[in-house]
Amino acid sequence: MTGLEDLYKEVILDHYRSPRNKGELPTPPAIMEEGFNPLCGDDVKVYVLLEGKVIKEIRIGGQGCSISQASASMMTESVIGKTLDEAKGVFERFKEMMSIHENDLNSEENSSDGAPSSLGDLEALKGVVKYPVRIKCATLGWNTFDQILSSVEN
Amino acid sequence: MSKSNFDSKVIKKGFPLLERSVNGSPIVYLDSAATSQKPIEVIERMNDYYKEINANVHRGAYHIAELATAEVEETRQKLHRFINSSSTKEIIFTKNATEAINLVAYSWGRSELNEGDVILLSSLEHHSNIVPWQQLSSERNIEIRWIPITHDGRLDLENIDELLKGVKLLCVTSVSNALGTINPVKELIEAAHKVGALCLVDACQSAPHFETDVTDLDADFIAFSGHKMCGPTGIGVLWGRLEILENMPPFLGGGEMILNVTSDGFTPNELPWKFEAGTPPIAEIIGLGVAISYLEKIGMGAIREHEQKLTSYALQMLNDRFGNDLVIHGPESSLERSGVLSLSYRDVHPHDLSQVLDQHGVCVRAGHHCCKPLMKLMGLPATARASLYIYNDESDIDVLADAINEAGKIFA
């Protein structure tokens, strides 16, 4: 085998091949933010349409590698229909997962209770932390989404 | 070593890093366009410098300081010979090629260029030969014009005379780091001189791979880095024509670059030290000197011959094996390209491709290669780039092909 099973889990490849909520939304009324990974040239556009404080629709544009595309696709499924506060909570748990394992790589096997729970499919992205360069790919869509959350807060 | 007995397997044995393995496979290093590996001679000489003659240069009148100074100046002599310049005064040490280009932009650019002047850039430039000119352009309101490219990534010179009208400086890379295209630099310099423009050549991707003759080229400035040609990081070279350098004001101020300092002002040092403020990277300069001798011993002609043969093999074999699934960007013929293979494999993202290759010990670069304007023109967000050097051989290309095939299985 290739030894890349931790990175390229089937659920990740599935989101890469069939990205959910891909496309654009008219701005306004939607809000759009764009994020770049200067290291590899990936770019992502996140569109969010709010209804009050609820994320009614979300779309992902731009291009990037399997990890950035799958992570953004999974993000859309995990935040759609949620309030801004709930979405911020998911964002923070995801970021925590990306950093907990960074500090805890060697004891990963027996530290599953240290990982944040209730991330569902998103936990498939845990393996990315073993490949530090790819963390930026996995978090690109999320950080861009967070810019929208911050701009709405203000 | 003459060209008839060039043997990349023997050469490879002289590079300690190439003995290691990566992820359980022997390393296949295919990223020499980013940085080359270092032969043992270079590594040991730099160590010896610190163990035996570490002292600041051009200052102390004691034995080891004189030895260190002599070795630094010997590298300058070697470079003078290596690029066939007219004087060692024309060889300026910088920390890298980027700093060399910035030196020209700050010193020459800011004393010679003013509002309304035009700089012509080729579309194949690395960001390091774009951004310093954009900085100058926004400061002085200088126009930047671009030489377009053909679909296969060569410079489109059909309207070069029109493009050169009113141009004060032409900046062109000798070889594209992203595509491997070899540019007709000599012709371009001649065309630039006809309209009274100067020409700066980014030689980072040619100086390690084939002969550089600044006299034959009739260039005005040439910049290259040490670490891509078997030398260490932290040392680059600017060569400039003597009469131009003499009229340029200093770039960085400090020690070494002065003849005299009073409370009222300073008198700049002579060339080349006028442009070498502060303590230079002494061990790195000495390491570069060893690298130059190493390359000269193999012979730049033999190196080019080896790389061209290997590139031909790679183009043919990869095409036979993958057909239309694998696109190798840039010119079709190995005569028009260096050993840079910029690849797109089906719809596998280059980041993913390089990740799978790494799993097989194969080191390639994925991304835009610091050439975003070029990549946009080519319609490519990113590519995976394999680049060859003296220590690579056909077996490395074969491992690359097998690993590409594995990536195809994961992303089927």
Image (cartoon, rainbow, N blue to C red):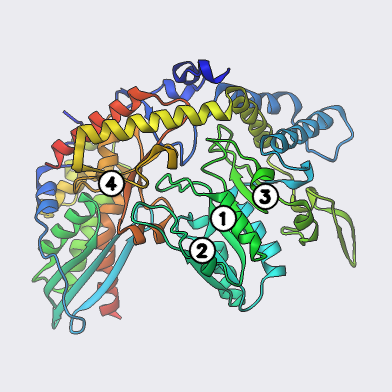
Question: x, y percentage for residue B226?
Answer: 59, 39
**Which of pointers 2 and 4 lies earlier in the amino acid sequence?**
2
**Three-letter amino acid code at the position of disc 2:** Ile
Q: CA distance from mark 2 to mark 4?
A: 34 Å
Question: x, y percentage for residue B332?
Answer: 34, 43
**Three-letter amino acid code at the position of disc 1:** Leu
Q: Give the mark count.
A: 4
Let me know if marks 3 and 1 both belong to one chain. Answer: yes
**Which of pointers 2 and 1 lies earlier in the amino acid sequence?**
2
Chain of residue at mark 4 = B
In this orientation, which residue lies closer to the viewer: A9 or B143? B143
**Which of pointers 4 and 3 lies earlier in the amino acid sequence?**
3
Check disc 2 and report its element: helix, strand or loop. helix
Picture quarter with the C terminus of chain B: top left
Q: Which residue is mark 4?
A: B350
Mark 4 touching mark 1, by CB under 8 A?
Answer: no
Q: CA distance from mark 4 to mark 1?
A: 33 Å
Q: Which residue is mark 2?
A: B160
Q: Which residue lies at the image location 53% right of the left edge and 38% below the top edge?
A: B228
**Three-letter amino acid code at the position of disc 4:** Pro
Residue A81 appears in the picture as rendered? yes
Q: Which residue is mark 3?
A: B218
Corner quadrant of residue B342: top left
Chain of residue at mark 3 = B
Chain of residue at mark 1 = B
Q: Which mark is in front, 4 or 1? A: 1
Mark 2 touching mark 4, by CB under 8 A?
Answer: no
Mark 3 touching mark 1, by CB under 8 A?
Answer: no
In the image, taking residue B114 as reference, residue B329 lies left or right, namely: left
Q: Residues within 10 Å of mark 3 (few under 14, many from 20)?
A: some
